[in-house]
Image: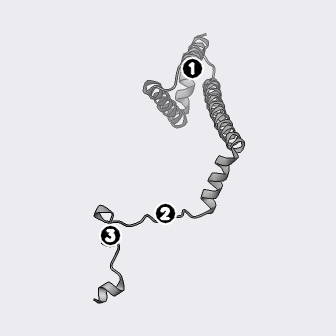
Amino acid sequence: MLIQIILLVAIAIITVLLTRSTAGARHQAVRRLMLVGFVLLAVLSVLFPSWLTWLARLLGVGRGADLLLYALVIAFLSSLATTYRTTALLNRRITVLARKIALAEAAIAAQEAINEAQPEGRDAVRRADAEPTARRELPATGPGGDPTIASPPSRERQKR
């Protein structure tokens, strides 16, 4: 009878822990403490198998192997619930990413359609990509518009 109450309470606790948000540090700490407790109980049951039988009889279970089976059922249900929550979270994230990608591709397609509808814009871009940019030569003038001051001296002038 006692084991039934303990198992039902364990199932209820696992259900509450798994239905809460997992983002908090407190939840992480509880999971780590449960893991440490599980490891300690596993080590003790391996080192002292009679202790597990004693604990099983104390809890109202006939054998230690049966108690171990009950604990493994609880651990399996906990793992199953955690895996389900993780999968559901990943599916939601993938859905959001797929929607963002679809919107981005639609925006790109719309921009390409606009570019196709305006051939002068498209041709201007193609010409700019195909032809090197020509530099416009501006007349070199000095102060007051005098071209002789701004232009470099010719070789003839340099020889003089």
| Residue 122: x %, y % from top left | 66, 49
Q: Nearer the viewer, mark 1 or mark 3?
A: 3
Q: Residue furthest bottom?
A: 159
Residue 43 seen in the current view: yes
Q: Residue 136 bears which disc, if any?
A: 2
Q: Residue at x 41, y 66 (%)?
A: 139
| Residue 117: x %, y % from top left | 71, 41
| Mark 1 or mark 3, earlier in chain | 1
Q: Residue at x 66, y 34 (%)?
A: 98
Q: Nearer the viewer, mark 1 or mark 2?
A: 2
Q: Quadrant of the N terminus?
A: top right
* Label 3 crowd bin: few (<14), some (14–19), many (20+), radius 10 Å: few
| Residue 129: x %, y % from top left | 61, 58
**Looking at the picture, which amino acid does disc 3 mark?**
Ala
* Label 2 crowd bin: few (<14), some (14–19), many (20+), radius 10 Å: few
Q: Quadrant of the C terminus?
A: bottom left
| Mark 1 or mark 2, earlier in chain | 1
Q: Name the residue nearer the viewer: 149 or 104.
A: 149
Q: Residue 150 bears which disc, if any?
A: 3
Residue 101's quadrant in the figure? Answer: top right
> Which residue has dot 1 on it?
14
**Looking at the picture, which amino acid does disc 2 mark?**
Arg
Whole-Å distance between the Cαs marked 1 and 3? 87 Å
**Looking at the picture, which amino acid does disc 1 mark?**
Ile
Whole-Å distance between the Cαs marked 1 and 2? 77 Å
Q: Indicate the secondary structure of the residue bearing disc 2.
A: loop
